[in-house]
Image: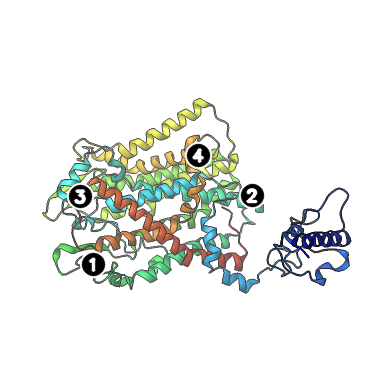
Amino acid sequence: MSINEKKRVAKHTVRSFRHSHISTNNKQKSDIKAVNGVDNAAYNHSISKEDLSNGDMKVHKNGELSNGFTDLEKATNGEISPDKAPYKPGIPEKLLLSFSVYTNAPKILNTNQPKGTLTSVNGIRFLSMTWVILDMYMSLENQKQFSYVLTLNTFIFVDNLATFIPQIAKRFTFQAIMNATLSVDTFFVLSGLLVSYLSLREMKKRGGALKFNWLLFYFHRYWRLTPPYMLLLMLYVPTFKYWAYGPFWPQTGLDVNECKDTWWTNLLYINNVYKADKQVRIKCVKNNFSEFSSWSYCMEWGWYLANDMQFYVISPFMLVPLYYEHSVRLFVKYYVVILLYADISEIITYTNRLNPSVFCIYVATDIEMHFNNNLLISSQDQTVGMKLYIKPWNRVGPYVVGFFTGYILYKTECKVKMSKVVNLVGWSVATAMAVSVLYGLYTSDGSPPDFSNSVSALYNATSRTAWGLSVAWVIFACATGYGGPVNALLSWRGIIPLSRLTYCAYLVHPLVIYVYIFSRRTMMHWYDLEMIYLFLGHLCVSYAAAFLLSLAFECPMIGLEKVLLGRKKNS
């Protein structure tokens, strides 16, 4: 029998099988892909009797049966009828899946978000994190004054510090780096806004504050922040001294006594208030040049987490009145809170007779240089910077601004009508305030402005709250449909995965830069292109490390909470 005759016989057999075993609907006709497969010899499987019982042919998903019928073009009426219900993992399986990289990685990289999400927050969060990383590497801080752990001793490894720093300090654009500590205030605004907006919506959904699960409210926050924080601390503190080697490598690690006396303050989020003003000397290598000062509390950049948790703890005292009271009375109360915060900062500035931006740098040649910065430093009293910078009563202003902004968005449901004039005035005022705070201390020679004690106190008391108001306007305008191209940029879906990694990036980025700085074999020589490359490198490596940290520590904890408590993510 020839090949053509065999094909004709096969077609006739299939046609007979189709008419005898498949019932068709008068309104719909079946288009079965498997028939064509038999016709062109793509399927060489036999048909099992079990699948053809009762005169009907069951249709199966890919890989479920071995008879070759694969998703027969959604079968006779456009639907697939699986042979059995899909597998649903039980609690033990879900607990194991919480640690699955295969499951968690797509969740991090997913660009979808639920309805009602404030999408502009993603862009602000990511851009603020890049600003933090830029500041941490180039910030003008040194061992003879209050310092942040990351930039603690950057300058002792720079051979052209005495010429490069005065040169760039005269640039108007460099003020964005000098004053990059404002990036932390942006995070406080975001934190207050999201706590207020999401919690008030949940309270409304549940029918009031009395039906709101306050225990879960606190547990979720602690569970969300603490495991990655503590696991990273446990990993790096005792082992960092072994990560690399070199003439600058700290032989005893980064933290005093490997955090033996202070680790519990981080666990309780009180490391910004408990013995936080105590400073000790740490010796990296066997020479006085690499000897530096550090603050006695553990994982120094954790001061922000302590502030954020403390604000969160007291937030119900603001949430409940916001839910029940009228906005006019609440506005007065919140205005009083901000004034009290400003008064504390003003008192500290005035009593210590400090200028609003004195930033001291002592280089190896014992040359003392002062530059503009909105962070208050006193070369006479090194603890003043700590009193003003990391204490919660001095940083609550931007948080309150964000909190009240979230309340407005909740009350209006992000539906506000503004004329073009009002919108333009809002953007103009917000821009003017932001530029004034960021660039207002600039002088052509790079020296601090000659302000009186009263003006300095006023600046330190209001600058961070003014910055918070500017950020709050951007979020408000974008959420209500008046953001234009700014909202399009900040809400770009490609930023969403990077925004999810911001917390882990904050935790790990100091270690990334520390490894680079302390493992060097030679001194650094700074110039513009070098700094750009270093910044981009630190940014990419920090987010790559954050991705691994999130997969290892953060996502499993979120998955465990969802399985054990049945909590779903609402934003």
Kindly report which numbered mark, 1 or 2, lies closer to the viewer in this rendering.
Answer: 1
Give the CA separation, mark 1 to mark 2.
54 Å
Q: Which amino acid does label 1 sit on?
A: Trp
Residue behind mark 2: 204
Tell me residue 33's x, y (percent).
74, 57
Residue 519 placement: quadrant: bottom left
Give the side of residue 287 with respect to residue 22, left or right.
left
Per the image, label 1 sits on a secondary structure element best described as: loop
- Sequence-first disc among 4 and 1: 1
Q: What residue type is labelled 3?
A: Cys
Q: Earlier in the sequence, mark 2 or mark 4?
A: 2
Please name the residue that numbered disc 4 is placed on: 488
> Residue at (28%, 41%) from the top-left corner?
175
Residue 350 drawn above or below residue 416: below
- Give me the C-alpha separation between circle 3 and circle 1: 25 Å
The residue wearing badge 1 is: 249
Q: Dots 3 and 1: beta carbons under 8 Å? A: no
Q: Looking at the image, which residue is at 39% across and 54% down? A: 392
Q: Do the residues labelled 3 and 2 touch (CB within 8 Å)?
A: no
Q: Earlier in the sequence, mark 3 or mark 1?
A: 1
Task: Look at label 2 and name its amino acid.
Answer: Lys
Q: Quadrant of residue 42?
A: bottom right
